[in-house]
Amino acid sequence: MIGYIILIAIGVLLDQWTKMLVVNHLALGETKPVLDKIFSLFYLQNKGAAWGILEGQRLFFLVITIAVVIVLVYLIYQNRNNGILVNLSYALIAMGAIGNGIDRYRLGYVVDMIQLEFIDFPIFNVADMCLTVGVILLISYFILDEVRAHLG
């Protein structure tokens, strides 16, 4: 259990550190190429959720974030003796929720900065990556669990 809490803390610190670097070194709307034609840094302030949906619903997002994190920490505790995959996915989702939640609470928006150059995709951040990977792992866990149940 404590290992997952430490993992969450490290992920949140990494997310906040990368956001601080972007805010301190790029002007709003500025692009800085990192890997040519692969990705660049682009400082964006997102006042909504993914793709800017529900813009301006700060209180809603804060309440949802707190509730989700409480549930995820409870689920990690409940599943502490089960496989690593499910708890890792819960920890990654909590990491992402907390990282973006801190931004919403502190700033009123989420700092996004990673722009993929090879595809038309919304700009995102480390917290978003944690959320995405966590959800993919969780879906994988449930699919594998279902397959195991049917195979006996």
Image (cartoon, rainbow, N blue to C red):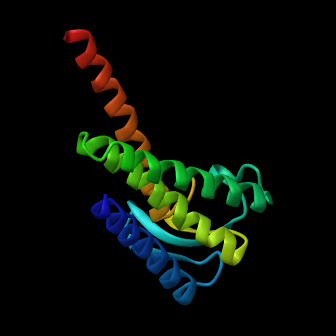
Q: Residue at x 27, y 63 (%)?
A: 3
| Percent of width and height locating residue 73 | 45, 54
Q: Residue at x 59, y 71 (%)?
A: 102
> Residue 142's image quarter?
top left
The reply to whether residue 119 is in sight is no
| Percent of width and height locating residue 147 | 27, 17
The reply to whether residue 30 is in sight is yes
| Percent of width and height locating residue 71 | 52, 48
Q: Residue at x 36, y 72 (%)?
A: 10
The quadrant the C terminus occupies is: top left
Q: Is 146 situated above or below 121?
A: above
Compare residues 39 and 67 and report the one nearer the observer. Answer: 67
Which residue extends farthest right? 56
Total labels: the figure holds 0
Which residue extends farthest bottom? 24
The quadrant the N terminus occupies is: bottom left
Asked whether, in this view, residue 10 is left or right of residue 149, the answer is right
| Percent of width and height locating residue 5 | 36, 64
Q: Is 76 situated above or below 35?
A: above
Q: Residue at x 27, y 15 (%)?
A: 149
